[in-house]
Image (spheres, helix red, strand yellow):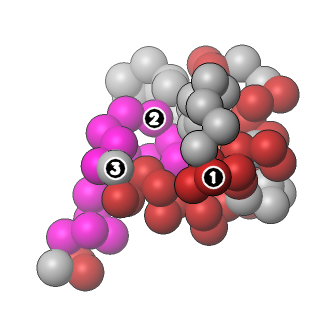
């Protein structure tokens, strides 16, 4: 889930971010609610890989980034050591 207020080159993937066109409620669902819709949108997003890399690199804790929930990102990081 991108932050729209930067021109940092690292964040250029946000220009194609599909989630910028939707409400944040998809990407920051209430605890225990479904992340399915957000993940579906990520699946169609051109910036998905860069988005996920950014979230992993910056240890983003909340919300869906690059098609993965916070738990899934945590597992991925843990498995990568
Ligand atoms: S992959 Fe998902 S969270 Fe990341 S920019 Fe695209 S729609 Fe947003």
Residue 40 placement, left or right of 58: right
| Residue wearing tag 2 | 63
Q: Does the beta carbon of the residue at mark 3 sit less than 8 Å from ligand 1? A: no
Residue 22 in picture, x, y percent from top left: 78, 25
Residue, x 79% and y 55% (percent of image)?
Answer: 45
Q: Nearest to the eye among marks 2 and 3: give it.
A: 3
Mark before the other along the chain sequence, 2 or 1: 1
Instruction: Judge: label 2 CB < 8 Å from ligand 1.
Output: yes
Residue 1 is situated, as x and y percent measured from the top left of the image, at: 58, 37
Chain-order first, disc 2 or disc 3: 3
- SS class, disc 3: loop
Q: Are marks 2 and 3 in contact (CB under 8 Å)?
A: no
Label 1: how many Cα within 10 Å (few below 14, some 14–19, many 20+): few
Q: Quadrant of residue 79?
A: bottom left
Spatial separation of the CA atoms under disc 2 and disc 1: 23 Å
Instruction: Identify the residue under disc 3.
Output: 58
């Amino acid at each position: 889930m991108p932050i729209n207020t930067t021109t940092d080159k690292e964040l250029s993937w946000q220009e194609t971010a599909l989630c910028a066109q939707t409400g944040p409620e998809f990407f920051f669902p209430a605890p225990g609610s479904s992340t399915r819709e957000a993940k579906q949108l990520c699946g169609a997003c051109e910036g998905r890989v860069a988005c996920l890399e950014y979230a992993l690199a910056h240890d983003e804790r909340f919300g869906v980034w690059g098609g993965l929930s916070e738990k899934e990102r945590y597992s991925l990081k843990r498995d990568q050591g």
